[in-house]
Image (cartoon, rainbow, N blue to C red):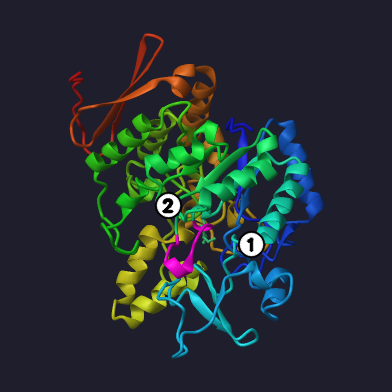
Amino acid sequence: EKLGVDGLWLSPVYLSPQVDNGYDITDYRVIDTMFGSNEDMYRLIEAAHDKNIKIIMDFVANHTSDQCVWFQESRKGTDNFFSDFYIWQDAKPDGSEPNNWGSSFGGSAWTWDEKREQYYLHYYAAEQPDLNWENPQLRQKVYDMMNFWIDKGIGGFRMDVIDMIGKIPDQLIDTNGPKLHDYIKEMNKASFGKHDLLTVGETWGATPEIAKQYSNPDNQELSMVFQFEHIGLQHKPDSPKWEYEKELDVTALKAIFNKWQTELELGQGWNSLFWNNHDLPRIVSNWGNDGKYRLKSAKTFAILLHLMKGTPYIYQGEELGMTNYPFESIEEVNDIESRNMFAERLAAGHSENEIMDSIRRVGRDNARTPMQWTAGENAGFTDGKPWLAVNPNHEEINADQAMSDPDSVFYTYQKLIELRKQHDWVIYGDFKLIDSEDDVFAYLRTYQGKKYLVVANLSDEENQFKNRQ
Ligand code: NOJ
């Protein structure tokens, strides 16, 4: 409330065995007791609403947990209501998997089920079987579940890997399948389209053309999508994320933002703006300087992003300038992606040190350590044992400290949010990149005859800026 945000996106809080941080859902209508009860959730929705904050739920409809009753029934055989809820295929004559797809978390994307004597598909862990969107009954169940939460008064959905629901394994189509947009239009009609809700799709490979397809209001699909082209600069081209780039290529960053800012014109599409989320390292550590210039770096990234055109998303703790975690051993890591990668790369001959180095730099748990409220025990996050260790720097970096320091990162975020609410140029102004020195990111927003110049120095050296326009 003090920060000024008008929405709160929660990572999945549904009943889950937590193989993948809640992205493996057992029951979409039940809140996991580790977070509270359904009643607690309804109270949260109401209490947030009273403060003009809407709750955005994470909607994971590409897959469920293998504990979900749909899957439990589906694996029993080929002739029950749930048989076709998932993607089952026979083994090849030699007993091998139907195709060569790999899971994002390592190994094959197919697992043999002894009960049903078929393979099932899972893009993620074997405990996360993929749903079969070709099945209209499955689709209806999903829409019912969405309506259940809409009726409880939520403000919208963030849609997990939504670009994968239209897959066709037989044709080796995994992303952006031919029926994807039909499904989304159908979903819109059957659920959120009738209400004033925010919907944002997670679409890793979206181009501006694809983003417009989703977010052009005439298409009646989603409000906007998360595209990750800028995030791609964290890794070496065409390499796994663990092969990370040591330095940010500011020139490439400018070109990417310029493309998205100018191609998604108002009325034709809409951008979401972010540096961080629960899958990404902390921006101030990865592309900034989280030592000597932590405050300046964190503020620079905030200003750069918040004065662009689109809807900004802040990931918890980003507004305090929270940093990556100094993981020393894999024992401290919880994330299935990092743990599987550790085992695979160790077996492939990489040194432990090299692997831990990439986890410290780009591993997902960097963003998942407890929120730092105070300088006290467990950073004031819990009286119990936190699920990941608290970053030792909570003694300096915490919400208490930020509140009492007018120069803190928090107040920069607060000011930016206020500016966005007060001034239409931030929302509607044209965007123009200014040709400048390599490490300087400068742009102009123009609105109703007035011009607003934003200049950010993304290096830790002094820099020059001459407006050459
Ligand atoms: C994207 C989510 O953001 C990530 O955390 C998760 O592991 C995968 N989708 C699978 O649900």
- What residue lies at 25% left-to-right and 41% top-to-bottom? 250
The foreground one among 314 and 135 is 135
Q: Is residue 329 above or below residue 190?
A: below
- Find residue 468 and report its horizontal and vertical position in percent: 17, 20
In magenta segment, residue 173: yes
Which residue is most to the right?
Answer: 39
Q: Identity of the amino acid at label 1? A: Asn
- Look at label 2 and name its amino acid: Trp
Horizontal and vertical percent position of residue 320: 49, 41
> Where the C terminus falls, by quadrant?
top left
- In whole angstroms, how far apart are the C-alphas of marks 2 and 1? 25 Å
Q: Earlier in the sequence, mark 2 or mark 1?
A: 1
- Whole-percent x, y for residue 260 in the image: 36, 36
The answer to whether residue 291 shows anywhere in this view is: yes
Identify the residue at horizontal 46%, vertical 85% (top origin): 92
Q: Which residue is mark 1?
A: 135
